[in-house]
Image (spheres, rainbow, N blue to C red):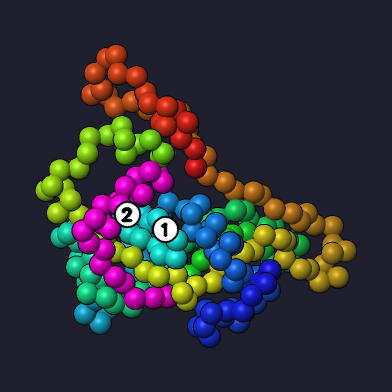
């Protein structure tokens, strides 16, 4: 699957290396298709993995939260982190018990955090809201100064990153292929249901187009 080399030794896939993808087009597509990532970091000598929303702008991946967040207070000074996202695409059933598998797309990146401040922070948060639903930023009430102050934005450059994509069925032994047992896969995908209005919504307020059109 790869068409370039791993950027560093720790991003080079050693097991199932044929599933590796090091090109940025594949990596960016996997990151952009996800709404939630996992951030691994160390606090007082203990490893912590925090799920959070993320977005990408060029060569950087961003996440945000409350200024009081322990994760963001830890990361604002610049610390090593591991960023990852995974999409579950299916379950593969094989003839042999040890050949059952998962179909997935994943990205793992290593880097050091940076605090984003000032106008750059405002631009980044607008990009996050717009990425979630184009049109939402202009529709919603603008943030107050207190809300700006209560939010922190962290970013990490995507220098040390690789993807792993398992899109095909696992290889099976020739002897297993002759067994009278079913093999195949069950696709898995995330779907969106119809929007549900807030019970406290006043009558006569129309649903905006970006909500009606929202799809994952």
Task: Name the residue furthest bottom.
Answer: 9
Disc number for residue 57: 1
**Residue tagged 2:** 124
The picture places residue 202, in percent across and down from the top left corner, at 24, 18
Name above or below for residue 17 compared with residue 195: below
Task: Name the residue furthest left.
Answer: 146
Q: Main secondary structure of the magenta part?
A: helix
Check contact, mark 1 vs mark 2: CB within 8 A: yes
- Label 2 environment density (alpha carbons within 10 Å; few <14, some 14–19, many ≥20): many
Name above or below for residue 71 compared with residue 16: above
Label 1 to label 2, Cα distance in Å? 8 Å
Question: In what element is the residue under mark 2?
Answer: helix
Task: Name the residue furthest right.
Answer: 178
The picture places residue 144, in percent across and down from the top left corner, at 15, 43
| Label located before the other in sequence (1 or 2) | 1
Which residues are the magenta region?
110-132
């Amino acid at each position: 699957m790869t068409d370039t080399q791993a950027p560093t030794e720790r991003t080079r896939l050693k097991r199932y290396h044929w599933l590796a993808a090091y090109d940025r087009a594949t990596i960016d597509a996997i990151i952009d298709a996800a709404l939630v990532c996992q951030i691994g970091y160390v606090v007082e000598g203990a490893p912590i993995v925090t799920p959070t929303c993320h977005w990408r702008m060029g060569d950087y991946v961003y996440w945000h939260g409350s200024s009081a967040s322990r994760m963001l207070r830890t990361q604002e000074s610049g610390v090593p982190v591991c960023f990852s996202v995974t999409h579950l695409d299916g379950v593969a059933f094989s003839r042999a018990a040890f050949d059952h598998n998962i179909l997935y797309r994943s990205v793992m990146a290593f880097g050091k955090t940076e605090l984003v401040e000032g106008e750059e922070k405002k631009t980044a948060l607008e990009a996050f809201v717009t990425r979630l639903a184009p049109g939402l930023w202009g529709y919603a009430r603008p943030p107050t100064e207190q809300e700006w102050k209560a939010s922190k934005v962290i970013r990490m450059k995507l220098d040390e990153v690789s993807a792993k994509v398992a899109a095909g069925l696992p290889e099976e032994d020739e002897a297993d292929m002759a067994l009278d047992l079913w093999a195949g896969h069950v696709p898995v995908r995330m779907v969106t249901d119809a929007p549900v209005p807030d019970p406290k919504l006043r009558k006569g307020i129309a649903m905006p187009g970006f909500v009606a059109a929202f799809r994952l």
